[in-house]
Image: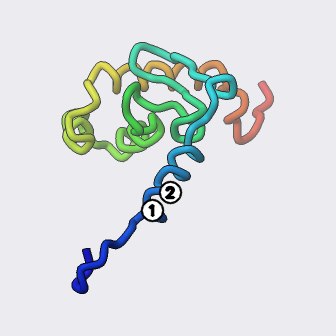
């Protein structure tokens, strides 16, 4: 209520929230979810389909980047508020290693004759 005793309506705010929630939903027919491992998924509705840890919006590349900077696994788990188990970090390293071996030719800077 206002100071003068008249009721105010917040219908515009309610409608805008409703419109936002409708805009964010992706129909299940257009949504793709790939289980890349026990802890890692790629869902087209979450983080633009980039691999994330299951149930979270923490992207795998972010954790791999922390590892490349030399952070300890315990530090990474603490920075992610204990939401990522160390087994998930190990799985991310394993999958990234497999992907690197499969696509190593694409990372070549220069071909050296044998």
What residue sits right under mark 1 in the picture? 11
Residue at 70% in and 35% down: 108
Q: Residue at x 36, y 47 (%)?
A: 69
**Residue 23: percent from left, percent from top:** 59, 47
Badge 2: how crowded within 10 Å, few (<14), some, or many (20+)? Answer: few
Q: Nearer the viewer, residue 22 or 40?
A: 22
Q: Give the CA distance from mark 1 to mark 2.
A: 6 Å
Name the image quarter holding residue 109.
Answer: top right
Q: From this view, report whether residue 90 is shown above or below residue 24.
A: above
> Circle 2 is placed at which residue position?
15
Q: Is residue 12 above or below residue 18?
A: below
Instruction: Identify the residue at image location x=51%, y=59%.
Output: 16
Q: Residue 9: x, y in percent?
A: 39, 68
Nearest to the observer: residue 33 or residue 113 = 33
Q: How many marks?
A: 2
Q: Position of residue 73 (x, y in %)?
A: 25, 33
Which residue extends farthest front? Answer: 5
Q: Is residue 13 left or right of residue 5?
A: right
Quarter of the picture containing the C terminus is top right
- x 19%, y 40%: residue: 78
The disc label shown at residue 43, or none: none
Please state if 41 lies on the left or on the right of 83 as rendered. right
Q: Of all residues shown, which one is farthest toward the top?
A: 38
Q: Is residue 11 above or below residue 96?
A: below
- Quarter of the picture holding the N terminus: bottom left
Q: Secondary structure at mark 1?
A: helix
State if disc 2 and disc 1 touch (CB < 8 Å).
yes
The answer to which of 87 and 106 lies nearer the viewer is 87
């Amino acid at each position: 209520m206002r100071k003068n005793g008249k009721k105010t309506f917040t219908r515009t705010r309610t409608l805008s929230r409703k419109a936002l929630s409708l805009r964010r939903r992706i129909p299940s027919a257009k949504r793709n979810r790939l289980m890349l491992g026990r802890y890692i998924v790629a869902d087209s509705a979450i983080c633009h389909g980039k691999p994330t840890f299951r149930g979270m919006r923490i992207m795998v590349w972010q954790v791999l980047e922390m590892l490349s900077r030399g952070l300890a696994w315990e530090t990474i788990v603490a920075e992610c508020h204990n939401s990522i188990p160390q087994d998930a970090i190990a799985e991310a390293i394993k999958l990234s290693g497999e992907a690197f071996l499969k696509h190593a030719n694409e990372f070549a800077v220069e071909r050296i004759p044998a």
